[in-house]
């Protein structure tokens, strides 16, 4: 049996069927602003009516503004029986999913940025979205019959003039401080010797896993969560984000993404499992002229300069624009 949690924090297109289980992240924090602003009452009610929350039984829902999607992963780990104790567990985001139709991924005319982050774009307006990209039980089950683990393709940062993963963290993500990344590396080197080589490799390479998207066997999932939340618990005690921006307060979530890469580097390097890497589908809402001002005011939430490029966070996507004056 397979179940895939789809993470939500706002009202939008609902992905819900026999394998997709939408989960509302940060449900216990309805009065606290997200990176996109406050959640409207009608939107909150929609989330309540249409999906489970990360706030029941053993949970860390109250840490969502710092842990982001990781509160959903934690809930699945600690309440696995509530999902029916599936043999395989997956995790995706309402606007970021794995592409199981490899033909559709391959034929997409990718820009350099798409190629760097191994992604393609689509719109919520596409009514055939799930089937078009192979996001149905029949197609996905064919994959899990062959593989123990399904991951996003490794991104290639050199295509956006970034020299390594440490630089990516330190110069690209608004509101963060590279000293926190260094603290994570130190923590792993001192406390998790089996992962030392992999985290040191990560900080020097241009190729790494992003997104925290996956499908994996139950046993792998539990081992991953034991590693992930053990490290984060230690980091949570020594990293102070109280004076950071709203986006900077998500530091532990960004470090969690780095830990995802570290864990998967080790697991795939050991060659004891069968795994598959797939492209990523990033979905956005279409925008007409009437919404232009709303977009200007609300959707762009971070811009950061990196030598010859501007990094713009738009629709929750990371876009890189050429800086003609760099």
Image (spheres, helix red, strand yellow):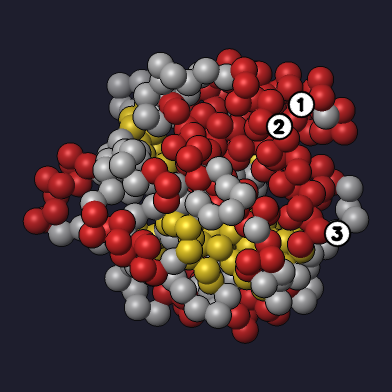
* Left or right for 234, reference 294: right
Q: Residue 179: x and y, percent? A: 58, 15
Secondary structure under badge 2?
A: helix
Q: Quadrant of residue 14?
A: bottom left
* Left or right for 127, reference 192: left
Mark 2–mark 3 contact, CB under 8 Å?
A: no
Identify the residue at the far front of this view.
Answer: 57
Q: Quadrant of residue 189?
A: top right
Residue 143 can be seen in this image: no
- Look at discs 2 and 3 and give the one toward the viewer: 2
Residue in the foreground of this view, choosing between 69 and 210: 69
- Relative to 231, say whether 279 is above or below: below
Give the alpha-carbon distance from disc 2 to disc 3, as whole Å. 23 Å
Quadrant where the C terminus sits is top left
* Residue position marked by numbered label 2 in the rendering: 231
Q: Residue 40: x and y, percent? A: 23, 51
User: Which numbered disc flags the more N-terminal residue, 2 or 3?
Assistant: 2
* Residue position marked by numbered label 1 in the rendering: 188
* Residue position marked by numbered label 3 in the rendering: 273
Secondary structure under badge 3?
A: loop
């Amino acid at each position: 049996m397979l179940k895939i949690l789809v993470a939500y924090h706002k009202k939008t297109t609902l992905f819900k069927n026999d394998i997709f289980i939408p989960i509302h992240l940060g449900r216990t924090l309805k009065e606290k602003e997200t990176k996109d602003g406050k959640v409207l009452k009608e939107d909150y009610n929609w989330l309540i009516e249409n999906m489970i929350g990360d706030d029941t039984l053993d949970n860390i829902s109250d840490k969502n503004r710092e842990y982001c999607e990781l509160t959903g992963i934690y809930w699945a780990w600690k309440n696995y029986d509530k999902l029916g104790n599936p043999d395989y567990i997956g995790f995706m985001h309402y606007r970021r999913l794995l592409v199981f139709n490899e033909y559709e991924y391959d034929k997409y005319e990718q820009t350099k940025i798409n190629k760097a982050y191994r992604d393609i774009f689509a719109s919520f307006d596409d009514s055939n979205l799930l089937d078009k990209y192979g996001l149905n039980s029949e197609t996905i089950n064919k994959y899990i019959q062959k593989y123990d683990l399904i991951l996003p393709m490794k991104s290639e940062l050199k295509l956006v003039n970034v020299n390594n993963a440490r630089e990516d963290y330190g110069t690209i993500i608004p509101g963060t401080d590279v000293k926190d990344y260094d603290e994570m590396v130190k923590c792993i080197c001192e406390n998790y010797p089996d992962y030392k080589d992999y985290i040191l490799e990560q900080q020097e390479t241009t190729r790494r896993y992003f997104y925290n998207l996956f499908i994996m066997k139950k046993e792998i999932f539990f081992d991953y969560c034991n590693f992930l939340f053990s490290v984060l618990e230690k980091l949570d005690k020594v990293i102070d984000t109280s004076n950071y921006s709203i986006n900077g307060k998500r530091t532990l979530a960004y470090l969690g993404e780095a830990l995802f890469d570290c864990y998967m580097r080790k697991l795939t390097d050991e060659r004891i499992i069968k795994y598959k890497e797939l492209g990523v589908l990033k979905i956005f809402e279409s925008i007409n002229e009437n919404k232009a001002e709303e977009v200007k005011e609300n959707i762009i939430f971070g811009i950061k300069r990196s030598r010859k490029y501007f990094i713009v966070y738009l629709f929750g996507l990371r876009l890189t624009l050429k800086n003609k004056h760099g």
